[in-house]
Image (cartoon, rainbow, N blue to C red):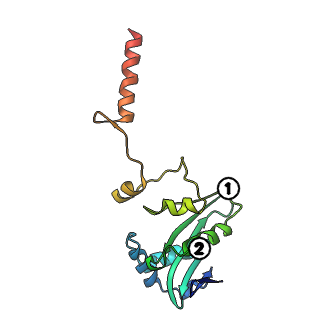
Amino acid sequence: MLISEEKNIINLEYNGDLSTINWERVCELFYNVNWNKRYPNEIKEAFEKSSHTIFAYDNDLIIGFGRTVDDGKYYAMLADIVIDPGYQKKGLGKRIVNKLKEAVLGYHFITLTAAPGKSDFYKNIGWKKQSTSYIWPQTPKQVRQHCEKEKHIEGHELGNFLTKKCVSREVENKT
């Protein structure tokens, strides 16, 4: 699939031959968008286990990519949507996301996790923020970037505060 963007021709390769991918370049793009360090052999393995993959090229240079992970029927997740910063804001990310989304239409749930600072991009192309999704954070960075702030009251976590309040009310009611 060729996409004309201004005077450039960008080639999108959908579910292409992953043995031809320059995985060092893929890791470089993760670095360029300030994501955690990725290792070529690990990211290659992750893409090989993906249901759908897409790579964008400017001539032979990888400038963007994305993939989906799914169970074949109920749950599908878009993952690793990365666009070279020099090619962002030109519609390429939207095209990659839409192509991947089309590949999993019909699933009961299609989700993604937006990179910090990219929520508006997804909202602008029609995605809705979930009110019930959760993460099991693996690092303090994930807590900072992907978790809601814990609510505290007078130095107590809200849950502990409310538990103490309820217990004290039960004691008051018994006397």
Disc 2 residue crowd, few under 14, some 14–19, many 20+, Cα 10 Å:
many
Contact flag, marks 1 and 2 (Cβ < 8 Å): no
The quadrant where residue 5 appears? bottom right
Task: Tell me if residue 128 comes above or below residue 29 in the rendering.
Answer: above
The quadrant where residue 56 appears? bottom right
Disc 1 residue crowd, few under 14, some 14–19, many 20+, Cα 10 Å:
few
> Could you tell me which residue is drawn at 58 percent across and 66 percent down?
69
* Residue reaching furthest to the front: 6
Amino acid type, residue under disc 1 in the picture: His
According to the image, label 1 marks what residue? Answer: 108
Q: First in sequence: mark 1 or mark 2?
A: 2
Quadrant the C terminus occupies: top left
From the viewer's side, name the closer residue of 15 and 153. Answer: 153
Q: CA distance from mark 1 to mark 2?
A: 21 Å
Labelled disc at residue 96: 2
Amino acid type, residue under disc 2 in the picture: Ile
